[in-house]
Image: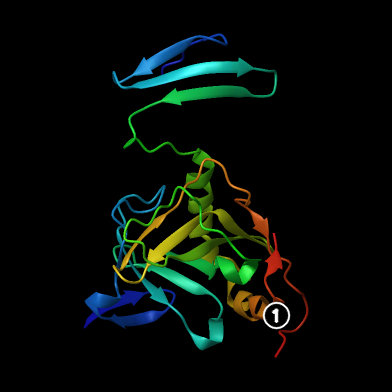
Amino acid sequence: MAQLATPHFGVLTYAESDVYYFPGGLPAFEALTRFVLVERPATAPIVFLQSIEDPELAFLTVPATRIAAGYRIPETAASGEGGELLPLAILTVRGSEVTANLRAPVLLDPATRTGFQAVPLDSPYSLRHPLPLPGGPPCS
Amino acid sequence: MLVIRRRAGESLTIGGGIEIRVLETTPQRVTIGIVAPPDVLILRNEIREQNREAAGSIRAPIAPQLAARLACLGPAAEI
């Protein structure tokens, strides 16, 4: 088991088999190729995509199917292996406004532990899909 | 930065293998055609900018409350 000290999650302990390898990184973060998923009951349904190479970097994501019923993975993202890909929408917080990137999802292949961000040239989905967050106290 | 002026219908070539054609221009937007080998990744830079902004989101003041509010989301919407 390996350990990673992070500012957001404290010390993470992970197995090498937990690591998702992103051969090309993510656009604007091309040098970062190794990530682990951080999921905590208290922060569900958020799936944090934590960089191993840069402990300060963690993306907030949510499974795209949690936001859009019948979400369709971009066609350009042919999976090759034919395995089931898990699409994660990256969230962006701007003040009190939160949007989800449904157009260019991070696609994870749990079978091969690889991932990449799909960058379709045409998509019915928005790069900044607003999440209608209810205000007030948290629901139970 | 190299600046080149082109009219609709004109083109230019980069690196011997990538051709950029200006297809149409209007006062608001330019339509560009790109001919490139299949292994060349073509990216709208919005995605890079979006990722940079998203990377800072975990430090947003409302991030700690975000999960609780997301958990209140109803069933996934038809989009």
Q: Is residue A56 visible?
A: no
What's the chain of the residue with tag 1? B
Under tag 1, what secondary structure?
Answer: loop
Three-letter code, disc 1: Cys
Coordinates of residue A111 in the picture (x, y in percent)? 31, 71
- Residue at the location (52% across, 67% down)? A61
Circle 1 crowding by C-alpha within 10 Å: few under 14, some 14–19, many from 20:
some
Q: Quadrant of residue A9?
A: bottom left
Against B36, residue A16 (above or below) is below
- Residue at the location (23% across, 75% down)? A16
Coordinates of residue A69 in the picture (x, y in percent)? 65, 67
Q: Is residue A25 visible?
A: yes
Coordinates of residue B53 in the picture (x, y in percent)? 53, 53
- Residue at the location (32% across, 76% down)? A5
Q: Nearer the viewer, residue B7 or B48?
A: B7
Quarter that holds the C terminus of chain A? bottom right
Against A84, residue A104 (above or below) is above
Q: Which residue is mark 1?
A: B72
Q: Is residue B61 left or right of residue A108?
A: right
Against B20, residue A105 (above or below) is below
Against B41, residue A2 (above or below) is below
Q: Nearer the viewer, residue A71 or A91?
A: A71
Q: How is the image coloured?
A: rainbow
Q: Residue furthest bottom?
A: A140
